[in-house]
Image: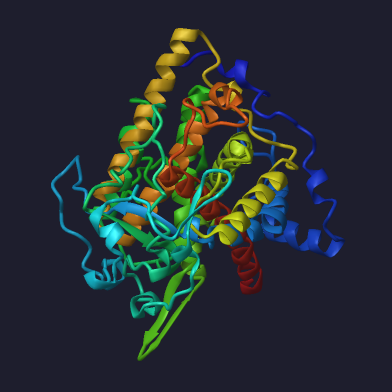
């Protein structure tokens, strides 16, 4: 049961409902004309559902202010290495085997090239020699600050292989990256970072792109997510999954009238999942294998693939809704970063890799991003959620959490290793965003000068949160490229 009626939530979900035109004042008339012309071609324009923010404002804010900053930030060492277990068995159905397409495969580096400290799992050990104790308590290894040569494995950029290479420079970098895991309610099934099956993966060497993974295995994953976890009413028979082979006679935008009958919280849940799916589909369409020959591989935007997934005519109007859900998800994670900023702004909090100069630069980039996020005038207001009767709200919040946690477990059923990597990271990033949004009281109580025993984020959660938001920012930026391509194709 949902706390409160739809009328209770209408008109509430934004903290500052100022007109979107404020975000457009920085554009020249020519820029504005190009943006609006492209938007109208996709019918992707106007105010989003369940909030007062509009598509145009997000486009300008993201593409001009956020995208350049988040791209630079996620290329820093602290954010480029993600520890993940890609060998966990699927908990819901028998493993049907991993994808046999070469672009899906895991290609680990030779064991001799993997740093000893990572292989042994001694992530909390710090060298007793060559360690500098920073005045704020962080320990910096002289070895970590020294330069090193790239291994041959690092230079190799196999098309779709999961390259778990770590350079010699990273040996000391991971020695002290373990953080205390808090007792907060998690929205995700977290990987055990100490597991011998967990590896550090360099995200820059393993970009999210089209791998060719599709068919029954991919369909079953998304079908389980949509049909079993998105609060679909029993009276709705048509599959929610856009990949479903047969979707009945009631296709199109008119089908979604059932969604308006749900309470805000359940509508939000569906839109988050749909937005995540849309973002992934944009990445696959934007980084498509266009040509493969002798020593030559060309990746780039596939307009036909993009149209198949989002074109208004080909999707009977559903494509526009899917893209608007992407923008809604962007607002949710943007709000989470806004809310979590005080956690990182404390002087003693460091994004520690062992390289003092680089760590300081990374922290500064993160603070600059937070400063920019604060200028956005139309943040989503999460206080409109779970705001009804106390017991009903608590029950719904727990149901919401468990449904999302279940989706994070489904990611272990993805047969393509690269798809699994990015699926797990983006799901964990969204789960961390939800954790932040519903921990406002704990964040407000954070001590300024000492660590907190309350709200905490592990390094794994931090890396996932920022990289997941980077993926959404990239999707919106890539949408601009597709709009231009659509215009040229007319």
Please indicate whether residue 424 sits to the left or right of residue 140 in the image: left
- Residue 230, given in percent of the width and then of the height, sits at 38, 33
* Residue 392 sits above or below residue 249 on the image: above
Q: Residue at x 47, y 14 (%)?
A: 393
- Residue 97, given in percent of the width and then of the height, sits at 16, 58
Location of the C terminus by quadrant is bottom right
Front residue (pair 232, 225): 225
* Residue 384 sits above or below residue 80 on the image: above
Colour setup of the view: rainbow
* Residue 378 sits above or below residue 185 on the image: below
- The number of discs equals 0
Please indicate whether residue 268 sits to the left or right of residue 362 in the image: left
Please indicate whether residue 101 sits to the left or right of residue 58 in the image: left
Kindly tell me whether residue 70 is visible in this rendering.
no
Identify the residue at the far bottom of this view. Answer: 294
In the figure, residue 10 lies in which quadrant? top right
Please indicate whether residue 112 sits to the left or right of residue 443 in the image: left
Front residue (pair 386, 310): 386
- Residue 232, given in percent of the width and then of the height, sits at 38, 30
Kindly tell me whether residue 173 is visible in this rendering.
yes
- Residue 68, given in percent of the width and then of the height, sits at 65, 61
Q: Residue at x 68, y 39 (%)?
A: 47
Identify the residue at the far left of this view. Answer: 94
Identify the residue at the far front of this view. Answer: 129
In the figure, residue 207 lies in which quadrant? bottom left
Location of the N terminus by quadrant is top left
In the figure, residue 487 lies in which quadrant? bottom right
Q: Residue at x 35, y 43 (%)?
A: 248
């Amino acid at each position: 049961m949902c706390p409160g009626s739809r009328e209770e939530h209408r008109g509430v979900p934004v903290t500052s409902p100022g007109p979107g035109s404020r975000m457009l004042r920085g554009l020249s008339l020519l820029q504005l004309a190009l943006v609006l012309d492209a938007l109208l071609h996709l019918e992707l324009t106007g105010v989003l559902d369940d909030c007062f923010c509009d598509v145009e404002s997000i486009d300008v804010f993201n593409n001009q202010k956020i995208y350049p900053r988040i791209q630079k930030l996620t290329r820093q060492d602290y954010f480029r290495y993600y520890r993940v277990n890609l060998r966990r068995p699927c908990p819901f159905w028998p493993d049907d085997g991993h994808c046999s397409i070469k672009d899906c495969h895991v290609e680990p580096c030779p064991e001799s090239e993997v740093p000893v400290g990572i292989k042994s799992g001694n992530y909390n050990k710090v060298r007793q020699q060559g360690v500098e104790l920073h005045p704020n308590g962080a320990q910096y290894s002289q070895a970590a600050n020294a330069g090193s040569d790239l291994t041959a494995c690092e230079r190799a950029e196999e098309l779709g292989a999961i390259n778990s290479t770590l350079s010699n420079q990273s040996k000391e970098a991971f020695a002290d990256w373990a953080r205390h895991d808090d007792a907060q309610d998690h929205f995700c099934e977290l990987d055990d970072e100490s597991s011998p099956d967990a590896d550090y993966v360099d995200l820059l060497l393993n970009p999210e792109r089209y791998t060719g993974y599709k068919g029954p295995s991919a369909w079953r994953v998304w079908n389980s997510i949509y049909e079993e976890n998105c609060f679909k009413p029993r009276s709705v028979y048509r599959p929610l999954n856009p990949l479903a082979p047969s979707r009945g006679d009631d296709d199109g935008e008119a089908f979604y009238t059932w969604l308006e009958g749900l309470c805000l919280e359940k509508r939000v849940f569906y839109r988050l999942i749909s937005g995540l799916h849309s973002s992934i589909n944009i990445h696959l369409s934007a980084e498509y294998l266009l040509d493969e020959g002798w020593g030559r591989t060309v990746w780039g935007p596939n307009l036909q693939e993009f149209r198949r997934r989002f074109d208004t005519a080909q999707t009977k109007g559903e494509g526009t809704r899917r893209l608007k859900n992407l923008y809604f998800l962007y607002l949710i994670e943007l709000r989470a970063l806004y809310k979590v900023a005080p956690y990182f702004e404390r002087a003693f909090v460091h994004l520690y890799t062992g390289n003092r100069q680089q760590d300081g630069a990374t922290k500064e980039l993160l603070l600059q991003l937070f400063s920019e996020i604060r200028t956005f005038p139309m943040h989503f207001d999460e206080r409109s959620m779970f705001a009804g009767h106390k017991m009903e709200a608590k029950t719904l919040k727990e149901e919401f959490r468990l449904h999302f946690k279940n989706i994070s477990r489904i990611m272990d059923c993805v047969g393509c290793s690269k798809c699994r990597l990015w699926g797990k990271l983006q799901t964990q990033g969204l789960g961390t965003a939800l954790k932040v949004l519903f921990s406002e009281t704990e964040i407000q109580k954070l001590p300024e000068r000492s660590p907190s025993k309350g709200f905490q984020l592990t390094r794994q959660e931090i890396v996932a949160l920022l990289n997941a938001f980077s993926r959404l920012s990239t999707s919106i930026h890539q949408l601009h490229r597709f709009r231009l391509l659509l215009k040229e194709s007319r």
